[in-house]
Every structure is written in C-alpha cells, then in structure tokens.
C-alpha cells in the first residue's frame, strides 16, 4: 500500500471562510440575499507610522469618510451600483453593494492631528504618524 500526500489549497481558515460566506449569502428559504460589503485591510507598523491600506474598488474618493474619535479610526463608505432595470434584464448580480463601517482602535502612540489619507486606483492608504515621544530613539554607545 502506498501513501500519497494530498496537497490541498484549502487551509482550515479558508474552509471556514468558504462555509461562512456560503451561509451568509442565503436566506432561510435558499434564495440569495445581498451580503454586507466590508473591505479587507492591511495594517503595517513602521518605525515612524502605522499604515492602514484598504481595497475599495468602484468607490469614489469623495464617498469615503475617515474619522478619528477617542482613539478609534473609523472608515466608512457606500458601494453603490446604479442599475436601470427598465432598460436591462439582469440574470445574475454578484457584486457586493451597500454601506460599510470599519473601526480600528489606535494606540496612544498615534498623533491624530497629522493623519494623512490618499486613494489611488481603488486602494485607500491612511498614514497614522507616531508621536515624537513614541518613536524609537537611537542611543549612541560611547567607548571609553
């Protein structure tokens, strides 16, 4: 008997996400329902700042709202698809639409007065500079 190792692209997390997305998209009667649009984000800490990057395809920069209140970064927008049902017959609609709101707790080391945001090709990048006292200080070691 030969044992063959089966390499699968499915990790436990991917399988969980697959099932969760399947059930989230169905009503109790089996009909599809719209799912809530929630963009995925990357959060990277650098020496001088924390950078939040979010994919927002199809959303105009004027429709994105960013706020910081009591140490919480809030990103919100609405993903709209304009459909003229009088002129066209839709056979399938799978693109996610709707409002979203993402909140992230900031550390005490972020300077809320210097936050910068830019959007390029549907990718939002928010730079949250660290306060001066939070930045690492280099101490020179003297030889005697």
Image (spheres, rainbow, N blue to C red):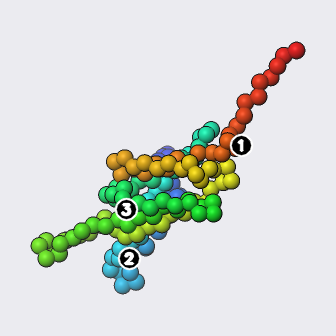
Q: Secondary structure at mark 3?
A: helix
Q: Classify 10 Å Cα crowding around label 3: few (below 14), some (14-19), many (20 and above).
A: few
Counting residues from the start of the chain, the first of labels 3 and 2 encountered is 2
User: At which x and y percent is residue 76?
Assistant: 45, 64
- Where on the picture, by quarter, is residue 144? top right
Numbered label attached to residue 107: none
- Where on the picture, by quarter, is residue 18? bottom left
The residue beneath circle 3 is: 63
Between tags 3 and 2, which lies in front?
3
User: At which x and y percent is residue 108?
Assistant: 68, 53
State whether residue 97 is above or below residue 62.
below
The residue beneath circle 1 is: 133
User: Which residue does the image show at 32% across and 80% down from the upper left?
Assistant: 31
State whether residue 60 is above or below residue 1.
below
CA distance separating discs 3 and 2: 28 Å
Q: Classify 10 Å Cα crowding around label 1: few (below 14), some (14-19), many (20 and above).
A: few
User: Which residue does the image show at 82% across and 19% down from the upper left?
Assistant: 142
User: Which residue does the image show at 63% across and 60% down from the upper left?
Assistant: 71
Q: Secondary structure at mark 1?
A: helix
How many tags in the picture?
3
User: Which residue does the image show at 63% across and 63% down from the upper left?
Assistant: 70
The residue beneath circle 2 is: 26
In the image, is 71 to the left or to the right of 13? right
């Amino acid at each position: 008997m030969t044992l063959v190792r089966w390499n699968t692209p499915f990790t436990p997390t991917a399988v969980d996400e697959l099932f969760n997305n399947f059930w989230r998209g169905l009503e109790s009667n089996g009909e599809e329902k719209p799912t809530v649009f929630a963009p995925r984000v990357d959060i990277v800490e650098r020496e001088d700042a924390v950078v939040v990057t979010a994919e927002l395809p199809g959303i105009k920069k004027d429709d994105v709202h960013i706020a910081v209140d009591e140490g919480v970064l809030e990103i919100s927008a609405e993903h709209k698809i304009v459909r003229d049902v009088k002129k066209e017959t839709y056979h399938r609609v799978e693109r996610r639409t709707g409002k979203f709101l993402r909140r992230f707790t900031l550390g005490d080391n972020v300077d809320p007065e210097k936050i910068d945001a830019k959007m390029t090709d549907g990718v939002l990048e928010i730079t949250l500079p660290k306060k001066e006292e939070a930045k690492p200080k280099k101490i020179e070691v003297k030889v005697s």
